[in-house]
Amino acid sequence: MRPFGYAAPATLAEAVEALAAGGPGTKVLAGGTTLYDLMKLGVERPTAVVDIHHLAELAGFDTTGGDELVFGAGARLADLAEDPVLRRDCPALAESLAKAASQQLRNSATAGGSLLQRTRCGYFRAGPPYPCNKRRPGSGCAARDGMDRQHAVLGTSESCVAAYPGDWAVALLAFDARLDLLGPDGPRTIPLSALHREPGDTPQHEHTLADGELIVRIRVPVTATARGSAFHKVRDRESFAFALASAAVAVRLGRRGTVQDCRIALGGLATRPWRAHEAEQALLGEELTERSALLAGEAALAGARPGTHNGFKVALGIRTVADALRAAGRRAAS
Ligand code: SF4
C-alpha cells in the first residue's frame, strides 16, 4: 500500500483548484473503474486523488433537446444506457453503453471517465520484466514481438500497438460529439476527435487535456441520421469483454434506398477511437446492399497494418462494419 492524499471538493471550481494545487502526481477519481485497477497493479501511483464522483454539477444529462444531447461527465453509464429517448433517437449511443463492461461496472463508470480509460494491453498492465513504452518511455514494446492478438491494426507506430478499449467514445465520435472542459485557464470546448492521440513516438501521452483540466460535459448534435444507427461489438465473451472489433454506424436513406448521410467509427481495431471517413464517402449516393456494406468495410480497414497474431482483425473489422450497416439500414428504412 502506497500512501496518497485524498480530497473531496464540494464544487467543480474547488476540484479544479485541488488539481492545480496537487501538481502532476494528482489523479482524478470519478467512477474509479480504471484508476483503482491500475493503482492495485502499480501502473498508476498517484501522490493524491481528487474525488469528483459526488459532484452534482457533473451528474445530469438531457436527451430531450431539439439541437443537442447533453451528458454530464459524471452521469453513470447504466443510467444513460437505459434512457428511453436515447434508445429511440440514437440507438448506437445507447447500445455502445449497454455493451460496455458489466452491469456492476456500468453502475459506477461515468460518461467522462469512460472516454479516458486506458489500454488493456497485458504487457502494459503486467509491468516488469516486460518492456512497455507507454508505461516506461524508451523501454521498448513487448507486444511487437509478443502476443498481439488483442492489439490494434490501425494508427499503430513502432513504439506502441495498443488498442483503445472503449465503446462509448467510438459511438460519440460517429456523431461529432464535443467536450466542454474546465481547467486552471478557464473553460474551453474541443471536438471529441481532438481528445485522443495516436501513439507516435510518445505513447505515454494518450490525450490532449491540459494538466488539471476536467471534462465537464459531452454534447452531441441532434441529427435525423442518428435514428438509423447501430453499434455492433464482437468480443471473446458476449457477457462482458473488451471489443476485438466494434463499429458505430448511422445511415440516412433517400429514395430507392440510396445513402444520403453516413457515419462510421471503429473500436477495438485502432490505437484511438477511429472515424472511417473514406468508408463513409464510399457509401454516399450508393444503394445500401450487402455488397456496398462490405465495400465500405474494406475501405474502413484499407490502411490496416496487422502484427503477428491479429491479422484476423482485418476480416473481422470488415464484417463488423458491414453487419452494423445492415442493422442501421433496417432502422433507417423503418
Ligand atoms: Fe506498452 Fe503499447 Fe507495447 Fe502494449 S503495445 S507493451 S502498451 S508500448
Image (spheres, helix red, strand yellow):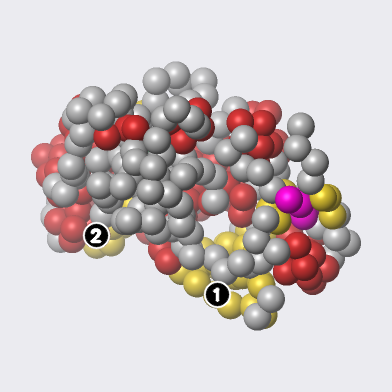
| Residue 13 or residue 293, whichever sits in front | 13
Residue at the location (83% across, 50% down)?
6
Residue at the location (75% across, 62% down)?
22
* Mark 1 surroundings within 10 Å by alpha-carbon count, few (fewer than 14), some (14 through 19), many (20 or more): some
Q: Position of residue 19 (x, y in %)?
A: 73, 64
Kindly identify which residue carries mark 1: 189
Q: Residue furthest right?
A: 10
**Amino acid at dot 1:** Thr
Quadrant containing the C terminus is: top left
Disc 1 C-beta below 8 A from ligand 1: no
* Mark 2 surroundings within 10 Å by alpha-carbon count, few (fewer than 14), some (14 through 19), many (20 or more): some
Element at label 1: strand
| Residue 69 or residue 189, whichever sits in front | 189
In the displayed structure image, the side of residue 121 where residue 247 appears, left or right: left
**Quick check: can you spot residue 256?**
no
Stretch of the chain drawn in magenta: 47-51
- Whether residue 239 appears in magenta in the rendering, the answer is no
